Image (cartoon, grey):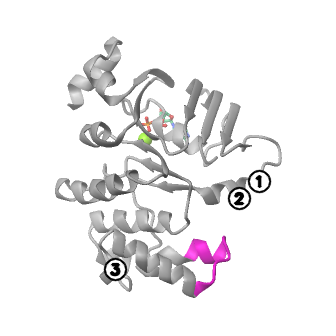
Amino acid sequence: MIELEGLHKHFGSLHVLKGIDLKVGSGEKLVVIGPSGSGKSTLIRCMNLLEKPSSGKVTVDGVEITAHKAPIAKIRQSVAMVFQQFNLYPHKTVLENLTLAPTLIKKIPKDEAEESGLAFLDRVGLKQKADAYPSQLSGGQQQRVAIARALNMRPKIMLFDEPTSALDPEMIQEVLDVMVDLAHEGITMVVVTHEMGFARQVADRVVFMDDGQILEQGTPEHFFANPTHERTKQFLSRII
Ligand code: ADP
Ligand code: MG
């Protein structure tokens, strides 16, 4: 579903991704971990071209999105992203947040987008908040709205960049519960997170990034029990 080949990214003189090769299968749940500044956000932002790689290839659902004149807008519709800071539109209601992109970008009729939007809000336990504004919600609720908003685009791929890192501890679980629920479906998920319980529970594979490279990877069972690199062991000993 996603293939990265020889991916490099520079920000000026800073070499942030140093030759990443990675394939994510259809329906796979991939968890990316690693120290702050190791390039995790840059990596997943390259998967929908929120960041443009300096070199290398990104292929999504069979389309090379780094190719000249690639249909990027179309591919973006099938790759949804959930951010650490929720990024809801503050002056739109919850339901408007869910219907804006489907109606404007996918040209879905408003009543249809509202109907499916309400169903997704129900699924994340927030149907009763449809007419509220984001500022009237807790952080955990805002993040669940952001997930419902992503789902209302009917993506094939969901990218999560530390979706619980900005939340108060008591709100983390409600967001993780929604993500676990999602993971039981066929959707492809790439999740940057430090929630190792989540990784153990849902990941098909865990990838450890360090200094712009993938240092090691494996199934959670194998990865957590037998980290081979010293850097991985150090990192795990700090966060588990
Ligand atoms: P992580 O998500 O693992 O913490 P990032 O991908 O956010 O790492 O960042 C990797 C490195 O790239 C960091 O040194 C960061 O400061 C730098 N970086 C990220 N985005 C930009 C940007 N837009 N401009 C310049 N430097 C950036
Ligand atoms: Mg990051």
Q: Position of residue 203 (x, y in %)?
A: 37, 38
Could you tell me the amino acid type at mark 2?
Lys
Give the spatial CA distance, label 1 vs label 2.
6 Å
Most foreground residue, 237 or 180: 180
Of callouts 1 and 3, the N-terminal one: 1
Q: Are marks 3 and 2 in contact (CB under 8 Å)?
A: no
Q: Measuring 66% from the left and 46% from the top, which residue is drawn there?
A: 61
Q: Is residue 77 above or below residue 237?
A: below
Residue 192 lies within the magenta run: no
Q: Is residue 209 above or below residue 29?
A: above
Q: Are marks 1 and 2 in contact (CB under 8 Å)?
A: yes
Please tell me in which quadrant of the rendered image residue 202 appears: top left
Residues drawn in magenta = 100-110
Q: Measuring 61% from the left and 27% from the top, which residue is drawn there?
A: 13
Q: Position of residue 206 (x, y in %)?
A: 39, 31
Q: Can residue 208 be seen in this snapshot?
A: yes
Give the spatial CA distance, label 1 vs label 3.
34 Å
As helix, strand or loop, the secondary structure at mark 2 comes to helix
Q: Which residue is mark 1?
A: 71
As helix, strand or loop, the secondary structure at mark 3 comes to helix
Q: Are marks 1 and 3 in contact (CB under 8 Å)?
A: no
Q: Which residue is mark 2?
A: 74
The answer to whether the residue bearing label 2 lies less than 8 angstroms from the nearest atom of ligand 1 is no
Q: Which residue is mark 3?
A: 127
Q: Is residue 225 left or right of residue 203?
A: left
Q: Position of residue 67 (x, y in %)?
A: 78, 41
Q: Measuring 38% from the left and 86% from the top, which residue is drawn there?
A: 131
Give the spatial CA distance, label 3 vs label 2.
29 Å
Could you tell me the amino acid type at mark 1?
Pro
Q: Is residue 238 above or below residue 3?
A: above
Q: Is residue 238 left or right of residue 56?
A: left
